[in-house]
Every structure is written in structure tokens, then in C-alpha cells.
Image (tube, grey):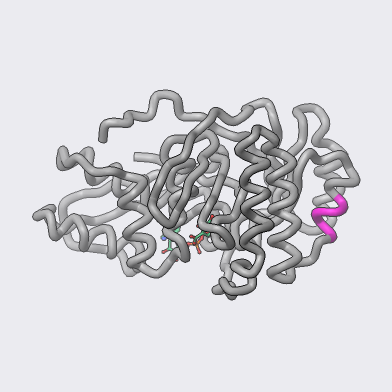
Amino acid sequence: MQAYGGVSIINALPSWYGSSMAIDMKVKVRVWEGKRNSDDKLVNEILDYFASLNVPDLRVEIESEIPIGSGLKSSSALSTALIGEIAQKFSLKVDVTKLSAILSLKAGVSYTGAFDDAVSSWYGGISFTYNKEFKLIKTQRASEDMIVLLLARGGKTRVDMSKLRAFRTLFLEFFNIAMSGRIWEAMKLNGIAVATILGYSSEPIESSLRAGALASGISGNGPSYFAVAKEGEEGPILEALEKFGKVKLVRAINLDNRDRTI
Ligand SMILES: Nc1ncnc2c1ncn2[C@@H]1O[C@H](COP(=O)(O)OP(=O)(O)O)[C@@H](O)[C@H]1O
Ligand SMILES: O=C(O)C1=C[C@@H](OP(=O)(O)O)[C@@H](O)[C@H](O)C1
């Protein structure tokens, strides 16, 4: 089973309201009956949950294009893909995205459950959620004709959640801007605010906005930066971002055929 990474539109830590957009960076997971081979806490939390439903011990193979601990939703892509794979293999009916959020919290890899990220990872497109109640507000298709430029970096450390929580009202406003359809504006405001609050340099963001990006900022809690460009207008932004490291170009992804009944 596979799921996808994403970039943040609204980080859910400040207000519990979150939104993210799936991008074409894949995580592919396969499982076989056999002795467990993972020492990852998220994988083991998921395997423990299914063991409690009498699913036998499983060997897990993960192929991921997303750097771990990047802000690009590697954990939600992994957990939804793994939960979906096990549910399909053993014909179990589960709510993939809600279970992903609950088990991510239990495994300690998430602050709010990252339900926003689980929904975009699993269903593609854009998610709007209220993570406190695992509530899906809406999903919408993402424009696949935009280019997302990534300074993809992994290995983030814990963030001080109270720093972001202090800006609850501001992020609630950003969320409302996104809900009204002004996605790039909300994405940019969120991305700049997260960078400023968490102390990341704003130089890559300023450079890409000067070069014509529709949005730029920190995705999730970082450390990855992103910029969004209209197709054909990405050249100067690529040039601006390349001064800060290797840049990866991807597109948003919609998964119109995802089975919503698993
Ligand atoms: N390829 C992978 N293999 C094993 N575990 C992974 C992989 N990708 C993600 N994870 C899990 O996700 C966690 C990282 O989550 P997090 O810090 O929220 O990063 P991100 O912002 O990329 O989602 C890791 O600690 C690990 O448990
Ligand atoms: O832990 C969480 O609940 C979240 C972490 C952040 O994402 P990353 O894990 O990608 O940093 C954030 O953007 C998301 O809305 C919620």
C-alpha cells in the first residue's frame, strides 16, 4: 500500500486546526507474516494495535522517498500506508486516518495526532481538519499544475509547543484564509510565521518570494523549506533556492481512486 508526503498549509500545533497538501513523494509499505523486523516506535505501535486484534506477527518492508523527521509528513505517510496495508491484507475495517492519528500520538511521534497530515497522505489533495477531535472538516483537490520546490531536510528535533501555542489566534485567522480558498496566501503566512516563531532563517523564504514564488515557508515544524511556483515560472525560484542547498521539484497529488471503504 502506498501513501504520500505533503507540505503544510496550516500547522495544527497552535490552534489544533490544520491543513496540508499531498505531494508526489511516496512511501510504499509491504507486510508478510513472520518475525518482527522493525525497531521503529511508530511501526511497533501499529503492529501492537493489530496484534491486539489477533493479527499475527508481521515483517514490514518500507520504501520511502521522504526524509524522516522533515516536516514533509513522513510519519503520516508511513502510518497510513502501514495501517491500510494490514487492514487490506487481513480484511479488517478500520478508519485509516483516525487510527493513524491515535497511534501517532501513542507512539509519541506527534503533538496533535497530525490528523491533517494523515488525511492528505492517505486521500491526496488538500485536507482541513480539527485535530483535537479527529474531525475532518473538508478535503479539496490540489492544483497539479503548480511546481513545489523543496529544500528537503530530515532529522528534526523536538519543538517547544508552547512557542507556537502562544499564537493560536493568528493561526486560526490563517486557517480561515485557507478555508476561504486563498490557499497560497495562507500557506505563505503560515510558513513565514512558523519560521519566525521557531527561529529558522527567513532568507530562503525571502529569496524565493522575491523570485516570484506564490508561497514559501517552513513545512510542518521544519526543518524543510518549500516554495510554490506556477508551472513555467519556477526557474528563478529554483536559482534562488539552490543557494541554500539541493532543491527537489515535485507536484501536488490527488488520489481520486483511493478506496474510502477500507
Ligand atoms: N522510512 C521510515 N522508516 C521508519 N520510520 C519512519 C519512516 N518515515 C517516518 N518514520 C517514522 O516517523 C517519525 C518521524 O515523524 P516526524 O518527526 O513527525 O517527521 P515528519 O515531519 O517527516 O512527519 C520517525 O520517528 C519514525 O517513527
Ligand atoms: O505533530 C503534529 O501533530 C503536527 C506536526 C506538524 O507537522 P510535522 O510533523 O510534519 O512537522 C504540523 O504541521 C501538523 O499540522 C501537526
Horizontal arrangement in the rendering, residue 232 relative to residue 139 (left or right): right
On the image, the x and y values in percent for residue 80 come to 37, 47
On the image, the x and y values in percent for residue 184 come to 72, 39
* Identity of the residue drawn at 80% across and 36% down: 234
* Identity of the residue drawn at 84% across and 36% down: 235
Q: Identify the magenta region.
A: 203-207
Residue 75 against residue 167 in the figure, above or below: above
* Identity of the residue drawn at 39% across and 40% down: 2
Horizontal arrangement in the rendering, residue 130 relative to residue 190 (left or right): left
Res 152 → quadrant: bottom right
Q: Name the one closer to the observer, 174 or 1.
A: 174
Q: Is residue 135 magenta?
A: no
- Main SS, magenta residues: helix
Horizontal arrangement in the rendering, residue 197 relative to residue 90 (left or right): right
On the image, the x and y values in percent for residue 250 come to 64, 38
Residue 156 against residue 74 in the figure, above or below: below
Q: Name the one closer to the observer, 257 or 37.
A: 257
Quadrant showing the N terminus: top left
Quadrant showing the C terminus: top left
Q: Name the one closer to the observer, 30 or 221.
A: 221
Res 163 → quadrant: bottom right
Q: Name the one closer to the observer, 152 or 208.
A: 208
Residue furthest left as drawn: 54
On the image, the x and y values in percent for residue 253 come to 55, 32
Horizontal arrangement in the rendering, residue 255 relative to residue 90 (left or right): right
Q: Is residue 205 magenta?
A: yes
* Identity of the residue drawn at 39% across and 50% down: 134
